[in-house]
Amino acid sequence: MSLTSSSPEPHPVPVPDPTGSTDGHRRAELVSSLAGVRRRIADACAAAGRASRSVTLIAVTKTYPASDVVTLAGLGVLDIGESRDQEAIAKVSDVARLLGLVGGDVPAPRWHFVGRLQSRKSRSVAGYAHAVHSLDRIELVDRLATEVARAERDPLEVYLQVSLDGDPDRGGVTVEQLLPLADAVEERAELLLRGVMAVAPLGADPDAAFADLAAASSRLRAEHPQATAISAGMSNDLEAAIRQGSTHVRVGTALLGRRGPVFG
Ligand SMILES: *Cc1c(COP(=O)(O)O)cnc(C)c1O
């Protein structure tokens, strides 16, 4: 494409399609990367003797636009993860607007908040999230439950984040703190205890880390049998996570592409 003087016409402005995408190229990219990720999940499930449908794919769309969420939803990916409230809140409303433009053909996605959650963001997150994967302190139980009640919405699904490296700065509770936290969640009708979540420690063997998470999950299930979910596995380690029992993989890079340095 060159700006030659041969045409006196102004450059035509590309007409965006209703999904907000300006060309089919991005859609083709997402179709291809989604097929690759679905294949990896299916292969990992087959190797572990599990059914593919026992694993839910959550597309982590942080740093990527609402148009990608709508494209993914159109391809059947209806679980969407975000890790920063400020970004998520704008994207949620953009996605709702774009879905309105396509006229009800594409179902609305469920939003999963997967990042570290500051207490003061509880009201905002309770306004749009279907699930929070990073619940790791009692204070958040109270704040989230209060905000869910205030919003008069369906119960918020929660996953208790477990620290697999003992570093509290990276979020998560120790295995000892897990059961008291679960008990606090169970006291609140506004919250639905789904299970555990973790991020594998950098540089560690992911199989060993996810085996620790599986052990924490079985301790939790001994007291709370319905809390069966295990949110584990990202682009680089989803096979190990599925081997160790993950039910929800959170995949960003392998689906959407590499992010800028801000999010690591
Ligand atoms: C960004 C993020 C992911 C996705 O990571 P990728 O390596 O890009 O697949 C998953 N979980 C959490 C908590 C994240 O912040």
Image (tube, rainbow, N blue to C red):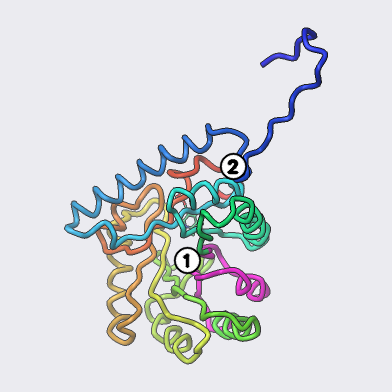
Instruction: List the residue tagged with mark 2.
Output: 260
Q: Residue at x 50, y 89 (%)?
A: 188
254 to 251, vertically: above or below? above
Instruction: List the residue tagged with mark 1.
Output: 167
Q: Residue 62 lies in magenta, yes or no? A: no
Name the kind of residue labelled 2 in the image: Gly
Magenta stretch, residue numbers:
111-139
The picture quadrant where one finds residue 218 is bottom left
Neighbours of disc 2 within 10 Å: few (<14), some (14-19), many (20+): few
Residue 69 as seen in the image, left or right of residue 20: left
Residue 63 x %, y %: 60, 48
Number of the label disc, if any, that sits on residue 255 = none
Q: CA distance from mark 2 to mark 1?
A: 25 Å
Which quarter shows the N terminus?
Answer: top right
196 to 87, vertically: above or below? below
Q: Residue at x 75, y 14 (%)?
A: 3
Q: Residue 127 lies in magenta, yes or no? A: yes
Given residues 257 and 148, the one toward you in this image is 148
